[in-house]
Image: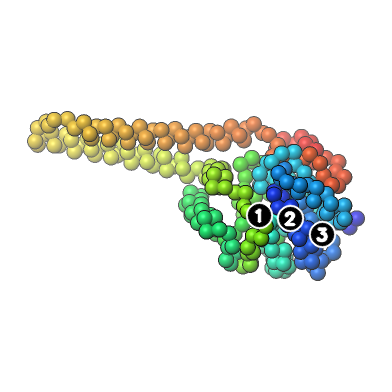
Amino acid sequence: MTTPHISVVTPVYGYQLDLPALYQRLCAAITPITPHFEIIMVNDQSPDNAWQVIQELAARDQRVRGINLSRNFGQHQAITAGLEFVRGDWCVIMDCDLQDQPEEIPKLYAKAQEGFDSVVGMRVQRKDDLSVRITSKLFYKLFNYLTDQELDHRVANFGVYSRRVIDAVKRYKEAGRSVGLLLLQVGFPRCQIEIQHAQREVGSSTYTFKKRLQTAQSHILSYSTKPLQLVVKTGFFVVSFSFFLAVYFIFRYLKWGSETPGWTSLIVVLLFLSGLLISVVGIIGLYVGQIYNEVKNRPLFLVAETTFAVQSIVNQQNGEKIF
């Protein structure tokens, strides 16, 4: 079989009704570029019959390569699993819900041929729900502040990436990961171009507010230590404030004499300092928890079965074969 020129990696979770349409539109979009391509669909233990649909597509067309994970590992781990099996010179990463439109791939690929290793789609007008757009924008503002970066909330994972970018991303070992941020972090020539974002036609997003909050927390802790720096600065501020307050009370005592002690002010100060100490311990605890998750050195994903023959793949964290 001819080595693919383009590989498409898409994580699958709960969108089986879109998969045949996704397959057909991908074939129609990529065939004019090259007939040598592969579509890697990673089933992240979708609660429906997505794996059966993937198997049927793979049986009809050997360019469809299905990967079934042993349990639900999450979107970014599922993408990581797909990247392990990429054989193409170029890789397209996209969601399976068709909000990332396959018809935009030729535009992304053409831009990449101008000398870019990464060409990422920037959604001109996001078609997500208002709550999703608002929370996404707030997260990126907070994330940019804490990491001193300038990420655009209109940019996600959808893009075309060269083989050396994919190989570089595979070398990163952290469990708390964002594929989009890793693709940015590896460097190499990169650009963003405007693309059209589609309305979701089938199903609804599985990212609840709680999941989005957990994802935001994980990404911030994984890519920034600024919260710890802010805690230190806050501590110095409280110490400085306490010093000047003590000077003020001494001056007032020398000038006007002693007064009846203020119970309210004492309680306010105690509550403030107690709350500050609890917050400090909590933030440190979050980072300790993040360290705990990393040092366990567990595999990022486990493969239950595939639709194609595979010898083995190696766990990028400790070099052990995991499939």
**Which x, y percent locates residue 258?**
11, 31
Crowding around mark 2 (Cα neighbors within 10 Å: few <14, some 14 to 19, many 20+) is: some
Asked if the residue under mark 2 is in contact with the one under mark 1, i.e. CB atoms within 8 Å, the reply is: yes
Whether residue 141 sits left or right of residue 30 in the image: it is left
On screen, residue 29 above or below 52: below
Q: Which residue is mark 3?
A: 37
Q: Tell me the amino acid under the disc marked 1.
A: Gly
Label 3 to label 1: alpha-carbon separation: 28 Å
Q: Secondary structure at mark 1?
A: loop
Which of the 4 quarters of the picture holds residue 115? bottom right
Q: Tell me the amino acid under the disc marked 2.
A: Leu
**Which x, y percent locates residue 96?**
70, 55
Q: Quadrant of the C terminus?
A: top right
Q: Tell me the amino acid under the disc marked 3.
A: Phe
Asked if the residue under mark 2 is in contact with the one under mark 3, i.e. CB atoms within 8 Å, the reply is: no
Q: Residue at x 91, y 55 (%)?
A: 1
**Which x, y percent locates residue 80?**
70, 47
Asked if the residue under mark 1 is in contact with the one under mark 3, i.e. CB atoms within 8 Å, the reply is: no
